[in-house]
Amino acid sequence: MSNWHTLRAHLLHGNLPSEQQALSLADCEDTAALVDVAAVLRDRGHRNVVTYSRKVFIPLTHLCRDVCHYCTFARTPKKIDQPYMPVEDVLALCRQGADMGCQEALFTLGEKPELRYSAARRALDEMGFPVRWSM
């Protein structure tokens, strides 16, 4: 019997894998078999319960130095009203999320937009966070 079949039987009998066994799963080339075992274990542990975490989405900025063609989030300075969300608006959004039962906040911001946009650098400076490097 192969190591995979032995491990599969071990897992399906409710045993946890050792660290070495868990790492060996990365070498298994039978993806369908891995998915089947994962589905059995998931269903055994959670049945058909789907969980989620209520969170509030807080976009601190829509600016980003990257140009990812799949991104629907990033904007240029010409297409936004202000480079960064004011602190008062962030707090108001947090409070609104809490009132709606959110337990988490997802803060999003671009990848160092100050490296690309002078508007970002100026805004950071005005908020008391001057960019202290030369370009």
Image (cartoon, grey):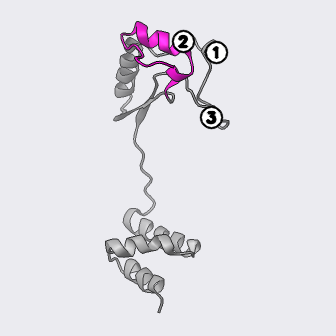
| Amino acid found under the numbered disc labelled 2 | Ala
Residue 124 in picture, x, y percent from top left: 43, 13
Q: Earlier in the sequence, mark 3 or mark 1?
A: 3
Label 1, secondary structure: give it: helix
Residue 111 in picture, x, y percent from top left: 50, 30
Q: What residue did someone put label 3 on?
A: 71
Q: What residue did someone put label 1 on?
A: 79
Q: Is residue 44 visible?
A: yes
As drawn, which residue projects farthest toward the top? 126
Quarter occupied by residue 52: top left
Label 2, secondary structure: give it: helix
* Residue positioned 51% across, 28% down in the render: 110
As drawn, which residue projects farthest toward the right? 69
Q: Earlier in the sequence, mark 2 or mark 1?
A: 1
| Amino acid found under the numbered disc labelled 3 | Cys
Q: Earlier in the sequence, mark 3 or mark 2?
A: 3
- The answer to whether 26 is drawn above or below residue 48 in the figure is below
Around disc 2, counting alpha carbons within 10 Å, would you say few (fewer than 14), some (14 to 19), or many (20 or more)? some
Q: Say whether residue 133 is magenta.
A: yes
- Of residues 87 and 111, the one drawn nearer to the viewer in this rendering: 111
Q: Is residue 11 left or right of residue 71?
A: left
- The answer to whether 1 is drawn above or below residue 59 in the figure is below
| 3D distance between C-alphas at marks 2 and 1 | 12 Å
Q: Is residue 62 visible?
A: no
Query: Which marked residue is nearer to the observer: mark 3 or mark 2?
Result: 2
Around disc 3, counting alpha carbons within 10 Å, would you say few (fewer than 14), some (14 to 19), or many (20 or more)? few
Q: Which mark is residue 119?
A: 2
| 3D distance between C-alphas at marks 3 and 2 | 21 Å
- Of residues 102 and 17, the one drawn nearer to the viewer in this rendering: 17
Residues drawn in magenta: 112-135
Residue 109 in picture, x, y percent from top left: 48, 27
| 3D distance between C-alphas at marks 3 and 1 | 15 Å
